[in-house]
Image (tube, grey):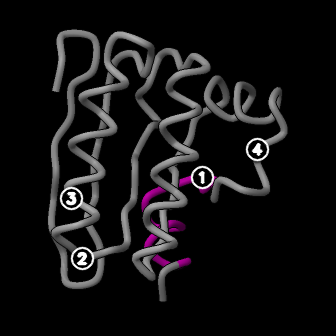
């Protein structure tokens, strides 16, 4: 995606899985939002973002997650976020843990889609 954010995409029957590493910050956010947004439009509409290897999320990254969650909902899909303690702490700091569907593992996220 960008120098500060790298990732891979797997397309399954009912969902797309993105495994990301690096920084979800103001530098990487525009490309991140564009790539994931286009993927929601193309389908499948359910997105799993594996952020368990993400080192840092700033306010622009959180904003992108909220926008993408709304976009997925509007497309009758969902956005599941696999998190780590650092990402969870950042999300809870701004009280978005109820809006953003945080999961402890990719398996838990897939189960949530069933």
Estimate how packed mark 2 is, as few (under 14), some (14 to 19) or many (20 or more) residues with alpha carbons within 10 Å: some
Q: Depth check: 28 or 11 in front?
A: 28
Type of secondary structure dominating the magenta stretch: helix
Q: Which residue is mark 2?
A: 44
Q: CA distance from mark 4 to mark 1?
A: 16 Å
Q: Residue at x 21, y 34 (%)?
A: 7
Secondary structure under the numbered disc 1 in the rendered image: loop
Q: Nearer the viewer, mark 2 or mark 1?
A: 2
Confirm or deny contact between disc 4 and disc 1 (CB under 8 A). no
Residue 104's mark?
A: 1
Q: Earlier in the sequence, mark 2 or mark 1?
A: 2
What secondary structure is marked by label 4? loop
Is residue 15 placed above or below 97 in the rendered structure? below
Tell me residue 69's x, y (percent).
Answer: 52, 57
**Image quadrant where residue 35 sits:** top left
Please provide the residue range marked out in magenta. 102-112
> What element does badge 3 sit on?
helix
Q: CA distance from mark 3 to mark 4?
A: 23 Å
For marks 2 and 3 on the same chain, the one whose residue lies earlier in the sequence: 3
Query: Residue under circle 3?
Result: 39
Cα separation between marks 2 and 4: 25 Å
Left or right: 56 as drawn, with respect to 110: right
Q: Are marks 2 and 4 in contact (CB under 8 Å)?
A: no
Query: Which corner quadrant holds the N terminus?
Result: top left
Mark 3 / mark 1, whichever is N-terminal: 3
Locate residue 19, reporting x and y percent: 29, 43
């Amino acid at each position: 995606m960008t120098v500060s954010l790298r990732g891979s995409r797997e397309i399954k029957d009912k969902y797309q899985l993105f495994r990301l590493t690096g920084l979800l910050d103001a530098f990487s956010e525009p490309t991140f939002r564009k790539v994931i947004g286009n993927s929601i439009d193309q389908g499948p509409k359910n997105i799993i973002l594996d952020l368990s290897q993400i080192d840092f999320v700033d306010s622009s990254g959180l904003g992108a997650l909220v926008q993408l969650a709304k976009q997925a909902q509007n497309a009758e899909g969902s956005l599941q976020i696999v998190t780590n303690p650092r990402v969870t702490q950042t999300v809870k700091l701004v009280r978005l843990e109820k809006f953003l569907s945080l999961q402890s593992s990719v398996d838990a996220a897939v189960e949530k889609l069933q």
